[in-house]
Amino acid sequence: MTPPSPAPPAPETGPSAAPPPGADGGGDGKAARFQDLLRQAVQENTVTVTVLALLSAAVLGGLLTAFTSNAVLHAWSGFFSAPGNAIAKAWSVAAGTYVALFEGSVFNPHTVAALFQQASLPTAIHDGYLSAVFNPLSETAVQATPLILAGLAVALPYQAGLFNIGGQSQFIGGAIMSAWLGYAVSLPFFVHVAVCVAGGFAGGAALGWLAGEIKARTGAHEVIVTIMLNYVMQYFLAYVLSSQSLMQQPGTSNSITLPIASDAHLPLLAGTHLRVNAGFLIALACAFAVWWLLNRTTTGFEFRSVGANASASRVAGMNVERNWALVMLIGGGLAGLAASSVILGTDFTLNPQSYGTYGIDAITVALLGLGRPGGVVAAGLLFGALHAGSPGMQTATGTPVQIVQVIQALIVLFVAAPPLVRATFRLSAARGRGAGTSMSKGWNA
Amino acid sequence: MERVSAATAGRLPVLLPPGPARGGGAAPWAGRFGAPAAYLVFGLVDILVFGLHAKGDVTFSFTPEFAKVSVPNLSLAAAATAYCCGAVTAALAAVRLLDVLGVVAAGRVARRVLIGAVLFLFVIALLAWASGGQPIPFNVVNLLSGTLSESIPIMLGALTAVICSTSGVINIAIEGQLLLGAFCAAIATTVTGSLWLGLICGALAGSLVAAVLAAFAIAYRVDQVVLGVVLNTLVLGLTGYLYNAIMVPYGDTLNNPATFNPVKIPLLGDIPIIGPVFFDASVFLYLTYALLLVIHFGLARTRWGLRTRAVGEHPVAADTVGIRVLATRYRNVILAGLIAGIGGAYFTVGSVGSFGPDMSSGEGYIALAAMIFGRYTPFGAIGAALLFGFTTQLQSILSSINVPIQSNLLLLTPYVVTIIVVAGLVGKVRGPRAEGIPFVKS
């Protein structure tokens, strides 16, 4: 089985294939890269469009929270007697939602105040007051970890022209393997974590490969196959967790596994008060590995070539079907790693809801990241921040956490359609390509 | 612009050898002997699993409660029934083997009948095993009428998919159309107290999602697969959010709709077996019949259908002869959204009543699979949708008669069936040639 960081064959120098239609020249040093960035920002205005897409989604999300909040609805009923009241209420709810999101995910001034109110700084640090200051950032990193990994699981196959929306099934596959290895096997500390993480990769990879192989062998569209696998794995997870002979905690009727052995926990990075753990480093390493795989190896070259034009790649001698299966295998493995980071990093047990909304979030992360590893990290951090802030937001303002999913989808919708954003904000038309347009080639391709 | 080259890319494969992923379909996987071998496996399961474990007698009842005309029950020895099914299946496997070897020449229709027969015998053996020895007779009418009502959202979604695909737009947002339709129908019915207004609002909600899809796909040329999935996410998040924000606190005033009562058609509804299955159901089923006929006739026989197909197959040619490609696509996608919206309304005002988050549970995607399995034709899509509905209904009946299979394993069967159908049984299906490719007038 492939290790967590995918290690394809070293770049061959042989006359393997023609240049892919979509390959860019790559950076010839810093100057070229800077120019590239500048060109994107000004000429194709991808960056501008992304920022404006974020802004538009935030405004729409704010309007939604403002106009569905209880307090505001009551104020609206008295709109004609006190119009200012309604508008002020609406503003305060929307603003409060975003302030709470920010305080939960980046920085909360109250924690600093609390830190300096303590008599002596060393005791305050010992009691966790300093950690409290950094807790929002730690939570953002914790939430971003599975999003980045699962986002890569969508972004990598995307480069090969496959739309992997089976993140959920692959996540569950990885979670089952990680959790089982975590509680049922006894190994020394470091080895145990490594085995569990590798198991998570293998579990996800198996499901990803299954979808890729079905596509390669029969031509069944991967979107339908992966969606159906999501539901299959969802019920399969419920099944293994409710069967005493399989994974259910012995002697109970709860659908939950035994707790993971403590040597299988991912090591914490910043003290016992903060949840940020080695999973975050794994996520960053995987993002780098995916970038390296795509841009520096023959395998990645073939992936991109197949994604840009499968027919031309076939003529050039590439095995398109093998590439599909392989890219889905690696992608599935990445989703499995996302599961490992959750099971071994924060949850330490497996329950029927462990998969959360990672499958859907992964799609939005990958699309916002324009299918590139660096973009996925940035998008994962952004959405991680939204997730980290949302529980606090719900308690503070009563806004349901699902608002985060709405904002995410709106962002992606706007990012996917640059012409819409340009038209809205009267930007000059440029030849930029959005997340969606790069892949418009139809159902039968 | 560059999109035009994508449209012309369809012509490129003429120069190329056909790829193994196209066309050849299941051949490399299963080989020539795949089909007879699979039949034989079914036969062995009939005998070894169901036959050996069956006990007592199985009684099939063909009469619903309170029926005017009653049909006598059919009582069979469960084990013997399963053995017979297995034996006949094995014989069919032999016939298929002879077909593969070239001794008998079976046409395409005959092969399909064989598949149908094998599956039918499998279901009979399964029921004999599951229901054998149970005190209550197994009601076949309930199974069939339940199949029809379970299938309604899938059938309507599949009809939507057929129209959209035929006009060249991939509509993966059916899931979102169903969900928003369900949501809006629940609210509208509760607030206004009128079921029909709820139905209309549900339909309009479906077409609202379709309109967004159309705008982004047609005007902004966003990839339609990506777009559909994002729209589904948006609707899932939006309905989940609104459910918690306004429906939970105001459940009685916003999420407490009445539901349509079954309407029995006079005379037809009294025919034994057929009557209660087809003609004693909710308004939604009759709407489905009507839409099926209208769409089938419309696509095959009318000017609208011809233009729709032209726009989906070869937009450049259609444009040349003066058909307004983009307008046709817009209109069709938005109108088709109405149908999926009605399907969504069925979830709330047709069956369950109150709305619940993610209550469409993937049926929009199953509808797409049904469209592909049904080879992009209205009748084919409806047939495939019924197959999925049957699996779902069988699953829920089996879990209610305490079959010793874990309920979660039963719940995942419809999805496994979908994968098998899409991967294995479909074989070569060519959709409309320009499906999913934006049209840019040059």
Image: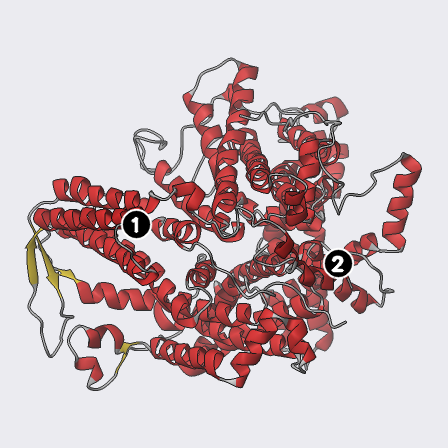
Q: Which residue is mark 1?
A: B102
Give how far across and how far down residue A357 sits, in percent: 54, 47
- Label 2: element kind: helix
Give how far across and how far down residue A407 sits, in percent: 65, 57
Whether residue A162 is situated above or below residue B335 in the rendered picture: above
Residue A224 in the figure: left or right of residue A57: left
Whether residue A394 is situated above or below residue B32 in the rendered picture: below
Chain containing mark 2 = A
- Name the residue: 56% across, 77% down: B308
Report the Cα–Cα distance between label 2 and label 1. 62 Å
Residue B265 in the figure: left or right of residue A248: left
**Extreme residue toward the front, this view:** B103
Q: Nearer the viewer, residue A76 or A264?
A: A264
- Label 1: element kind: loop
Q: Which residue is mark 2?
A: A53
At label 2, counting other C-alpha atoms closer than 10 Å, the crowd grade (few under 14, some 14-19, many 20 or more) is many
Q: Which mark is residue A375?
A: none
- Name the residue: 45% across, 16% down: A186
Whether residue B351 is situated above or below residue B401 in the rendered picture: below
Among the 4 quarters of the image, the one containing residue A327? top right
- Image quadrant containing the C terminus of chain A: bottom right
Q: Nearer the viewer, residue B410 or B331?
A: B331
Disc 2 vs disc 1: which is toward the camera?
1
Among the 4 quarters of the image, the one containing residue B106? bottom left
Residue A389 visible in this rendered orientation of the protein: no
